[in-house]
Image: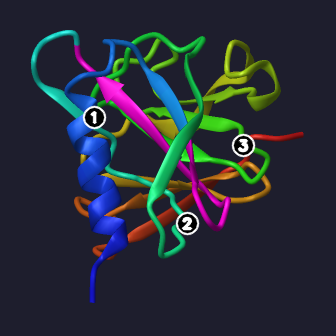
Amino acid sequence: MFNYSKAVIGIIATAATILPAVTILSLISTVEAKETLAFSQSINTGSNHSLTNKLPYQIAQSSVGKFRLQTGTALHETGKNFDFGVLPNGDVVAIKKSQTGSNSTEVHILDARSNYKRFKLQTGTALHETGSNFDFGVLPNRDVVAIKKSRTDSGSTEVHIIITRN
């Protein structure tokens, strides 16, 4: 059986080598099911382009269609110290793990209604700066889930939920 998700990731990874050197949010609609494939991309200005390691997607067994949106955002270029998530309303959550002004892990939410030209939230959190031993996810209510995979005090994988709303 053909693996559509791997094919789409391959298409996107190939496209990453020709896209402009900015942080881009791309929303791709599938042709038949009209579902959306959302991904955020961190691009360096050099020749080494990279996608973030999280790629939320829904794919029908059909080919990928045209971009619904491809635009620069209010967020500067990003690197390995960022992780991304997408909320149910389309807002993009950028999680800055290190090299922050607040000396903590930071949450930056790009507003979908502004076509990602404005931030809904930019804040430091109660979580210290983090590294590659952390993975992040975003809950539908905007809370950020930090999963500490190694070098933990408990000797086990730890879950930290960061509240990002009032």
Q: Nearer the viewer, residue 106 or 137?
A: 137
Discs 1, 3 touching: Cβ within 8 Å: no
Q: Residues within 10 Å of mark 1 (few under 14, many from 20)?
A: few
Label 1 and label 3: CA atoms lie apart by 22 Å
Label 3 and label 2: CA atoms lie apart by 14 Å
Furthest residue to the bottom? 1
Magenta residue span: 28-44
Counting residues from the start of the chain, the first of labels 1 and 3 encountered is 1
Amino acid beneath label 1: Ala
Work out whether residue 97 can be spotted: no
Residue 39 colored in magenta in the image: yes
| Residue located 36% across and 39% down the image | 130
> What color scheme is it?
rainbow
The residue identified by callout 1 is: 15
Q: Residues within 10 Å of mark 3 (few under 14, many from 20)?
A: some
Label 2 and label 1: CA atoms lie apart by 19 Å
Of badges 1 and 3, nearer the viewer stands 1
Residue 143's spot in the image, x, y percent? 70, 51
Of badges 3 and 2, nearer the viewer stands 2
The circle on residue 92 is none
The residue identified by callout 3 is: 90
Total label count? 3
The circle on residue 58 is 2
Amino acid beneath label 3: Gly
> Relative to 51, does residue 20 appear above or below in the rendering?
above
> Relative to 82, does residue 161 appear above or below in the rendering?
below
Element on which disc 2 rests: loop
Element on which disc 1 rests: helix
Q: Nearer the viewer, residue 62 or 27?
A: 62
| Residue located 23% across and 59% down the image | 151
Q: Residues within 10 Å of mark 2 (few under 14, many from 20)?
A: some
